Amino acid sequence: MNPLHGNDWPDAPGAGPLGDGRFATEAVHPRTVDEVREAVTRQAEAGRAVYPQGGRTALDYGRPPGRPGAAVDVSGLNRVIDYPHADMTITVQAGMTVAALRSVLAEHRQRFLIDVPQADRATIGGVYATNASGPRRFGLGPPRDQIIGVSFVTSDGNEVKGGGRVVKNVAGYDFPKLLTGSMGTLGVVTQLTLKVRPLPEASALVWTRVPNPDRIDPLLAALDASSTRPVAIELLNPAASWIMADAAGGWSLVVGLEGADESVAWQVDRLGRELEGFEYQVHRDAEAEPLWSALIEFQAGETGALACVANLRPSRVASFVRSLDPERWAVQAHAGNGVVRMRGLGDWTEDRAAAAIDAHRATAVRDGGNLIVARCPTPWKDRLRVWGEPRADWALARKVKRALDPRGLMNPGRFVDDL
Amino acid sequence: MSAPASPTTASRLLADLTAVVGAENVLHHRDEMLVYECDGYVIEKQAPDVVVFPTSTEHVVAIVQVCNRHDVPFVPRGAGTSLAGGTLPVGGGVMICLTRMNRVLEINTRDRYAIVEPGAVNVWLTRALAGTGVHYAPDPSSQTACTIGGNVATNAGGPHTLKYGVTVNHVRGVEIVLPDASVVQIGGVAEDDPGYDLTGLVVGSEGTFGIVTKVIVGLTRDPEGGRTLLAVFDGVASATEAVSGIIAAGIVPAALEMLDNIMVRAVEDAFHFGFPVEAGAVLIIEVDGVEAAMDREAQAISEVVQAHGGKVDKAIAWRTRKEPEYMAIWKSRKSAFGAIGRVSPTFCTQDGVVPRTALPHILRFMEGVSERLGVRIANVFHAGDGNIHPIIMFDERDPDQVQRALAASHEILDECIRLGGSVTGEHGIGVEKMAMMPKLFTPEDLAAMAAVRDAFNPDGRCSPSKLLPTGGACIERASPGRRASA
């Protein structure tokens, strides 16, 4: 913490929130990259921090802001820079919303491959800063697989780029990957180049009830060897089933299928045979949209002050999810990827939250992953260790951080290990 | 930093390295060094002082400690298939050859990962996974020789990257021995570990961050079925326009490769697959997915091919990739660079990238270069990715031809840059293309990259003078490289 500026947090919300109840010293709204550079340079000269903001859908994500500084709102940088649709790439400014990007791509029957909640507000820059994803990451890949170029303004006020605009390019270090999920701690992302894909002709969700939870793991293992090629494999515990589908409760396994008409028709039929003995419903195309939406928006749901995300080996998902008390947690697992989203139900105290999270985190770590706290009351954040068990590569991450932001001005305090 | 200066220091270095790995894992006689003085990029040669063959991570740690103690540079090497001088031991020093760390340590099909040592050959993993229902997707044309560690260093590609992505999309984590001899586990078997994606940063860093000693790769479900079509065209112009047509029709092929007439003839001479030798150009177009959708997808491609004046000469329906005709067509394609020896004794290949819609333009441009400079240029490349590999043929005994071949290379790569592309899609910068980095990146970009490299490699002892230009490195090459596969 900078001793000169450690104690001068504004106590009024005049310049807007930074997250976790803290307010910006000022808010700047650049419309151009040069204005971003000027804003960052000005803050850096004053020794103040820079907090990049987009749609403000994840302001409370991570640890609390570490020192006073300005909110740099990039939502004014919202243009399409280049959309050579026949190349299946698009270059956009970071402040463009996911919804706006989708409508641009839809004109050429193409799509952005990442499922993002609150797409009307969430920006592409924010999606990449937070490494957002949803059900279809199983079939379409995580954000890191779609990004091929990035530009960002570092704390010395320079715009730096990595990658390029072509789908294959190994010139220079892969800054697009480094910036993905870096939580704004390396610079203000200004521009991204992404791979896009044609919209599928058809889609379907096969919603299966699993009355006996002992059957979950064998079912997941069978899906892994299925003749079908799902784009999503979602496991919902009874509480999550109830929230999403208003169903009577019970365990659900939801399989997403996409592709050509024949492909989806064949897979639905095939899956039906593989699921013999289970009760399932098939939702096709437009009729499936509300359920897709429920599966995507679950992570942003309003219920409860506590939310966690565990990552572990996919083969451990069933036992991990079953170990979570369904009275206390609504749980959605992107089961094929080993990503488990947990929403706390009812009232929690810090003590109860800490005890539960410590126990489940230990399990996730033993199963090859970790458990982070996506949402909790600010005062609990230290004790709950929101970024999980320290990882072996964090010391190296700190060196990379120092290389690109030697004074620690970019989004300080918020990420792992005080990055 | 300097190479061993006197016989005494050199013998001490040798003794220390021998103490680590044993005499059977050290080479140091002059004649033993010949193999190691260059890789697939043969223009610059520099023998290392010593080659060591560690068999464990502990060995690598101890070797790096010895190098640091003696203040000598070190460079990792796998099979030496780099086409850009990625393993050239600039300044001499110790070459750490990882070919004896070559085990497949673990295969976990349910969790879709495998853990391999860096010296494991790419195709060994393919074979180890045969019949499991999953595969390791990156399949560079040199896959029968190149190592996974080398693939990680260069972020290698191959024909199937169009749909499945390149190496970085299939690496979940690495164990790396940093230049300070510490061992760090980066990433892991699970996805989405909190923290920076250092795995993504290390892949493609061309050995400048440390020595990777284990690789956790992700595995991909085998497709349920597929079609591989051979489409024949009058010339490269209509073939490349068909490439754009296929993509514009909303089809994402698994692979989309082009061979021009020179290459079709060379490959047919060598492998007798049945390529039509009169064809101006052929496309190998592969789609995969569930079998039920394949006929219509193949039909849609046929229509695009016909609309561009071509015709589908062969359509191979496959389920396992073991069908003889399937294996034959890909063997022909992947061995194409070997076949070019029948046409020209000496050649260099380039590795430019353009937006795929600019393929017709860059092909016309190359024809112009060929005529203007009087050099023959053949083409076999990953058309669906816009990743060109022009093969520039010349007689190395004729200095004038050599200069014209070099000029042709530079003009083509400059045009790739002008079209918004890149000077390398999969081979890497190595030493060959360092001087081109300032054409792609600003001084600020390069300074940021250098700062990140210094975070891993502060003394610059690991793979010095690679990837990023330094003052002394921007020398003009005297002659183009000449052997290749891609």
Image (cartoon, rainbow, N blue to C red):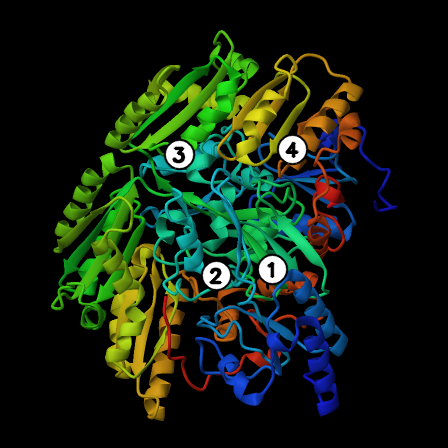
For disc 1, the chain is B
Which amino acid does the dot numbered 1 rest on? Answer: Thr
For disc 3, the chain is A
Could you say which quadrant of the image residue A13 lies in? top right
Check chain identity for marks 1 and 2: say if they share one: no
Which amino acid does the dot numbered 4 rest on? Answer: Ala
Check chain identity for marks 1 and 4: say if they share one: no
Q: Using the image as rendered, state which of residue A316 and residue A412 is in the foreground.
A: A316
Residue beneath the point at 50% across and 14% down:
A212
- The residue beneath circle 3 is A225
- The residue beneath circle 4 is A364
- The residue beneath circle 1 is B213
> Number of callouts in the render?
4
Q: Is residue A73 left or right of residue A218?
A: right
Q: Residues within 10 Å of mark 1 (few under 14, many from 20)?
A: many
Q: CA distance from mark 1 to mark 2?
A: 21 Å
Q: Residues within 10 Å of mark 3 (few under 14, many from 20)?
A: some
Check chain identity for marks 2 and 3: say if they share one: yes
Q: Using the image as rendered, state which of residue B418 and residue B127 is in the foreground.
A: B127
For disc 4, the chain is A
Residue beneath the point at 48% across and 12% down:
A211
- The residue beneath circle 2 is A170
Q: Nearer the viewer, mark 2 or mark 3?
A: 3
Q: Using the image as rendered, state which of residue A177 and residue A251 is in the foreground.
A: A251
Q: CA distance from mark 2 to mark 3?
A: 34 Å
Residue B217 at x, y = what percent?
51, 50
- Quarter of the picture holding the C terminus of chain B: bottom left
Secondary structure at badge 4 equals helix
Could you say which quadrant of the image residue B274 lies in? bottom left
Q: Nearer the viewer, mark 2 or mark 4?
A: 4
Residue A185 at x, y = what percent?
67, 46
